[in-house]
C-alpha cells in the first residue's frame, strides 16, 4: 500500500528565512502528488498538485513554490517566509487509477515567528 | 471547479447516539465519493468511499449514502464512541480527477 513520508514534524522559522519541506512516496509509481495547508481549526487548502516529474499546478498565489524533481519526491519551498505562512502542511499522494483515494503524510507544523 | 459544502460544521452527540454529516457538491460529473477522518495532529485518513453506481455502502458502524440526483452524499456513524471524535471531510470527484477539493470539514465531538 501507499505510504507518504514527510519531515520534519515540527518547524519554527523566523520571518524572512527560507523553507524547504520534503515529501516522499512509497508503494506506488507515477502518483499524483499534492500539498495542502491547514490553518488551526480550518479546512484543507490545496496549494499545489503534480501529475508528473516537473509538472506543477499552483492553486493559490503566494510566496510558496513546489517542485517534483523525481517521480516520488515532492518539495515545498519558500525564499522568504511570512507570518501568514504558519500552518499545518500536508503532503498527499494518489494512484493514477480511476477513483482512488488520497493517502496523507503526518504533516509538518510550521510556526513562523 | 467543484464547489463542496459540508453540514453541520460542528456536531456534538452523546456516546451511543448516531451522527450524520452531509456533503453537497456541484459537479454533476462526480462519480467518486470518499469520506476522510482527521484526528488531532495527524493527516486525514480514508474511512469509507462509494462509487456512483452504488446508493449505499456500510462498514460496521459507518455508512455512506449517495443521492446523485440531488448531488449530495452523507456519512452515517451509529453507536458513536469517544474515539469517533475527530474532524471529518468529504472530497467528491470524477474518475481520474487531478485537483482534489475537500469540503469545509465537520468537527464531531462524542460526549462520554
Image: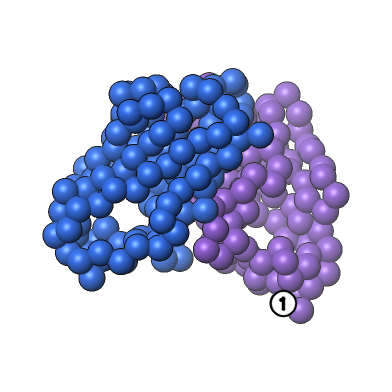
Identify whether A27 is placed above or below A11.
above
Residue ID for mark 1: B111
Q: Residue at x 73, y 24 (%)?
A: B53
Residue B1: x %, y % from top left: 40, 32
- The residue nearer to you, when weighing B54 against A58, is A58
Q: Residue at x 55, y 58 (%)?
A: B42
Horizontal relation, residue A28 to residue B85: left or right? left
| Residue B112, quarter of the rendered image | bottom right
Residue A15: x %, y % from top left: 17, 64
Horizontal relation, residue B63 to residue A7: left or right? right
Horizontal relation, residue A80 to residue B40: left or right? left
Display colour scheme: by chain
Q: Residue at x 44, y 59 (%)?
A: A9
How busy is the neighbourhood of tag 1: few (under 14 within 10 Å), some, or many (20 plus)? some
Residue B89 visible in the displayed image: yes
Residue B55: x %, y % from top left: 76, 33
Amino acid at each position: 500500500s501507499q505510504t507518504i513520508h514527510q519531515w520534519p514534524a515540527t518547524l519554527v522559522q523566523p520571518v524572512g528565512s527560507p523553507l524547504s519541506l520534503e515529501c516522499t512516496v512509497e508503494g506506488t509509481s507515477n502518483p499524483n502528488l499534492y500539498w495542502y495547508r491547514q490553518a488551526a481549526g480550518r479546512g484543507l487548502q490545496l496549494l499545489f498538485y503534480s501529475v508528473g516529474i516537473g509538472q506543477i499546478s499552483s492553486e493559490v498565489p503566494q510566496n510558496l513554490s513546489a517542485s517534483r524533481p523525481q517521480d516520488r519526491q515532492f518539495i515545498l519551498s519558500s525564499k522568504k517566509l511570512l507570518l501568514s505562512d504558519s500552518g499545518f502542511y500536508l503532503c498527499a499522494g494518489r494512484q493514477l487509477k480511476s477513483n482512488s483515494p488520497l493517502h496523507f503524510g503526518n504533516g509538518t507544523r510550521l510556526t513562523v515567528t | 471547479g467543484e464547489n463542496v459544502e459540508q453540514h453541520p460544521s460542528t456536531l456534538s452527540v452523546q456516546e451511543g447516539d448516531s451522527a450524520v454529516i452531509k456533503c453537497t457538491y456541484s459537479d454533476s460529473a462526480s462519480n467518486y465519493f470518499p469520506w476522510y477522518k482527521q484526528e488531532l495532529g495527524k493527516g486525514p485518513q480514508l474511512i469509507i468511499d462509494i462509487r456512483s453506481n452504488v446508493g449505499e455502502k456500510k462498514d460496521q458502524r459507518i455508512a455512506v449514502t449517495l443521492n446523485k440526483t440531488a448531488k449530495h452524499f452523507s456519512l452515517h456513524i451509529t453507536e458513536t464512541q469517544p474515539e469517533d471524535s475527530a474532524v471529518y471531510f468529504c472530497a467528491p470527484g470524477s474518475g481520474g480527477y487531478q485537483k482534489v477539493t475537500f469540503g469545509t470539514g465537520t468537527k464531531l465531538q462524542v460526549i462520554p
